[in-house]
Image (cartoon, rainbow, N blue to C red):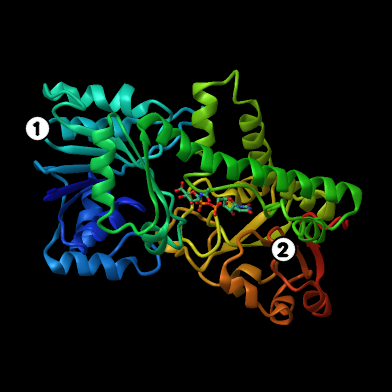
């Protein structure tokens, strides 16, 4: 019976995972190297904006089953849920995984189970983590069990999907996979499939790469539609009536610490094979530039043009700025001499280094010559265009997410451009 679980990394995945095991009867030690995370949590706060998470974390802490610390101790199970970002030259940064594996090696004992959850390049578990753990003198598969099991939860729906999504557990041995399956059955009611570690790593990357390539296709369709004078949104809606077609939504680009990152792990490991995957990444990374091009088509020279950016996070209704395409668009506008004020209901100006962020929508719009809808936050679906038109110098809006009611905005006097609508 697995008694004590250590979760290394209390971020978007580690904190919900630690709390979930704790509220399902396990003794859990949550470990993070950032003392501020520990202090925030110990004061009853939370550093992650995820619906329902603070309730579960508080319940876990109050139950006494979850303790948190910067120091790792001996446990029976070790779950490594630390970040695996990419470097500027698109290489996987596995330094946090290495650091966590070293810490586990220092307290590992016979019979323990180690699970790597962090999204990693194929073969990371067997070629990087296993040898580090074996510095303990114990042998993987024989003295300790080692598995890879990625999270596939959608930020914004983490607590629901953590329980109901299917899950894959890849073991360095069948016994490792079986032990991983037994562990997650504590709270997962989705189907749990077992395989080997490298296959499980590949599955995770395939899921996110599949999404990135399909978003790139939608983005390229948006540019083709603008070129041919077609409304891509109507075209997608009708094309998707086909029983085997599901074209995703064009947008200002692809952000987040997953979809915009994970495909590069394939490109890094197999640059002579992953051509389509690289190209899709380049299409998505060029989409912010296309948004700026649309603004240049409308305003001509952007020098001195005052714009209000609505939304800076990487997607709707989250507070996560990582790899956000909105930041890419704004950066390029500033480089062209435009004057940008941005407003995002999920980001407090005082808690962000973004100098152009203001604390309310009216301040962002006052005196501006154009609105730039960059994130489809729920709050932006009910804006009053008449009120905003009254604040602006010239009522123009470029909607990169196709969330506004065009006729209502036109009646309020706006000149409207939807990315991909085929109009000038
Ligand atoms: N986006 C579009 N058009 C779309 C869908 C998304 O432009 O049709 C953009 C979003 O605006 C955002 C980016 O793509 O900038 C990524 O958003 P997302 O909702 O596709 O994905 P994430 O990063 O929030 O979560 C993904 C999910 N993976 C898949 O859907 C295959 C989630 O299940 C993963 O667990 C998560 O990555 C992860 O952590 O790996």
Real-space Cα separation, disc 1 to disc 2, in angstroms: 56 Å
Residue at (43, 30) in percent of width and height: 121
Location of the C terminus by quadrant is bottom right
Front-lying residue, 318 or 19: 19
Residue that extends furthest to the right in the rendered view of this protein: 229
* Residue at left offset 11%, top offset 35%: 111
Residue 50 lies left or right of residue 422; in this view the side is left
Considering only vertical position in the picture, is 247 above or below 279? below
Earlier-in-chain disc, 1 versus 2? 1
Which residue appears at 42% of the width and 52% of the height? 166
Disc 1, disc 2: CB below 8 Å?
no
* Residue 396 at x, y percent in the picture: 78, 66
> Dot 1, how many residues are within 10 Å of its Cα: few (below 14), some (14-19), or many (20+)?
few
**Which mark, residue 110?**
1
Dot 2: element: loop
Q: In x, y percent, where is residue 342?
A: 58, 61
Query: Within the image, what quadrant is residue 361 found in?
Result: bottom right
- Mark 1 vs mark 2, foreground winner is 1
Q: Residue at x 28, y 51 (%)?
A: 184
Q: Is residue 105 left or right of residue 322?
A: left
Beta carbon of the mark 1 residue lies under 8 A of ligand 1:
no
Judging by the rendered image, the residue that carries numbered circle 2 is: 402
Whether residue 218 appears in this view of the structure is yes
Residue 83 image point, x, y percent: 36, 41
Residue 67: x %, y % from top left: 14, 57
> Judging from the image, what secondary structure is the residue with disc 1 in?
loop
Horizontally, is 155 left or right of 304 in the view?
left
Left or right: residue 320 compared with residue 62 = right
Is residue 392 shown above or below 143?
below
């Amino acid at each position: 019976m697995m008694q004590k679980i250590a979760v290394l990394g209390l971020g978007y995945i580690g904190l919900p995972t630690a709390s979930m095991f704790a509220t399902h009867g396990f003794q859990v030690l949550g470990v993070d190297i950032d003392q501020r995370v520990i202090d925030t949590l110990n004061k009853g706060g939370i550093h992650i904006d995820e619906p329902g998470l603070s309730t579960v974390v508080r319940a876990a802490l109050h139950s006494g089953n979850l303790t948190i610390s910067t120091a790792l101790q001996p446990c029976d199970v070790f779950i490594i849920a630390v970040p695996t970002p990419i470097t500027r030259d698109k290489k996987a940064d596995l330094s946090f995984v290495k650091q966590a594996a070293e810490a586990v090696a220092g307290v590992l004992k016979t019979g323990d189970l180690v699970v790597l959850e962090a999204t990693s390049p194929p073969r990371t578990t067997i070629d990087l983590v296993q040898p580090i753990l074996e510095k303990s003198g114990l042998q993987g598969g024989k003295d300790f069990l080692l598995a890879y099991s990625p999270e596939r939860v959608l930020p914004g729906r983490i607590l629901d999907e953590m329980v109901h999504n299917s899950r894959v557990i890849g073991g360095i041995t069948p016994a490792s996979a079986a032990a991983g399956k037994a562990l997650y059955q504590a709270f997962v009611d989705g189907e749990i499939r077992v395989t080997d570690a490298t296959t499980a790593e590949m599955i995770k990357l395939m899921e996110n790469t599949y999404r990135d390539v399909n978003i790139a296709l939608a983005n390229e369709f948006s540019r083709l539609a603008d070129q041919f004078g077609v409304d891509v949104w109507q075209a997608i809606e009708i094309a998707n009536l086909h029983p085997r077609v599901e074209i995703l939504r064009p947008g200002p680009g692809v952000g987040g610490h997953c979809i915009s990152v994970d495909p590069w792990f394939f490109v890094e490991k197999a640059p002579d094979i992953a051509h389509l995957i690289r190209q899709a990444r380049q299409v998505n990374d060029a989409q912010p530039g296309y948004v700026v091009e649309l603004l240049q088509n409308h305003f001509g020279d952007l020098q001195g043009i005052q714009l209000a950016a609505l939304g800076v996070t990487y997607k709707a209704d989250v507070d996560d700025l990582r790899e956000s395409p909105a930041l890419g668009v704004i950066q390029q506008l500033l480089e062209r001499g435009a004057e940008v004020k941005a407003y995002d209901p999920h980001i407090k100006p005082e808690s962000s280094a973004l100098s152009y962020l203001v604390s309310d929508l009216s301040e962002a719009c006052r005196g501006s010559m154009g609105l730039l809808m960059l994130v489809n936050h729920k709050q932006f679906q009910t804006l009053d265009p008449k009120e905003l038109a009254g604040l602006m110098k010239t009522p123009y809006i470029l909607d990169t997410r196709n969330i506004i009611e065009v006729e209502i905005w036109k009646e309020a006097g706006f000149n409207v451009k939807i990315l991909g609508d085929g109009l000038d």
